[in-house]
Image (tube, grey):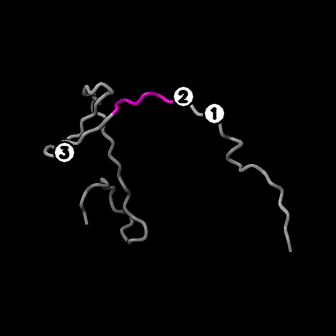
Amino acid sequence: MTLLMEQTAPWGLSRATTPLPEEDGLYASVQLDPTTQVTRFYDRDGAPVDMGNKVTITKSRGGGNDGSGGSPAVADDSNND
C-alpha cells in the first residue's frame, strides 16, 4: 500500500528570519601560555586584547539517574569523584 503525503515545509522554516550581519569578533587569535595556563587574546594586528574580567563558569546540578539526587551544584571542572 502506498501512502501519499502532502509535501510541506518544516514548521521551523516558517519562523526563520534573515541572518543578522556578521560582526567582527573581539579577537582574531588566541594563545595559551603553557607555563601559567593563561589565555591571551590578540587582534588582527597582533596586539593584545583586554578581555576584562569576563569569566564563564558552568555548574551542573546533582541528581539524575546516579542516585545522587539533591546533591549541591558543583563546578563542571571540579574533581569530586
Q: Is residue 59 left or right of residue 3?
A: left
In the rendered view, tell whether residue 61 sits above or below residue 22.
Answer: below
Dot 2 falls on a residue whose secondary structure is loop
In the rendered view, tell whether residue 14 sits above or below residue 3.
Answer: above
Give 56 or 60, whichever is nearer the viewer: 56
Q: Please name the residue that numbered disc 3 is placed on.
A: 37
Seen from this angle, which residue lies furthest bottom?
Answer: 1
Q: Please name the residue that numbered disc 2 is placed on.
A: 21
Give the residue at x 42% y 66%: 64
Residue 18 bears which disc, if any? 1
Q: Is residue 41 left or right of residue 66?
A: left
Going by the numbered disc 3, the residue's amino acid type is: Gln
User: Residue 71 location in percent, x, y?
Assistant: 34, 62
User: Residue 70 location in percent, x, y?
Assistant: 37, 63
Dot 3 falls on a residue whose secondary structure is loop
CA separation in Å, label 3 and label 1: 40 Å
CA separation in Å, label 3 and label 2: 34 Å
CA separation in Å, label 2 and label 1: 9 Å
**Within 10 Å of the Cα at label 2, are there few (<14), some (14-19), or many (20+) other Cα atoms?**
few
Give 72 or 47, whichever is nearer the viewer: 47
Going by the numbered disc 2, the residue's amino acid type is: Pro
Seen from this angle, which residue lies furthest front?
Answer: 45
Going by the numbered disc 1, the residue's amino acid type is: Thr
User: Residue 35 location in percent, x, y?
Assistant: 13, 45
Residue 26 shown in magenta = yes
Give the residues drawn in magenta, as a range.
21-28
- Hey, which quadrant is residue 28 in on the image? top left
Give the residue at x 84% y 68%: 3
| Mark nearer the N terminus (3 vs 1) | 1
Dot 1 falls on a residue whose secondary structure is loop
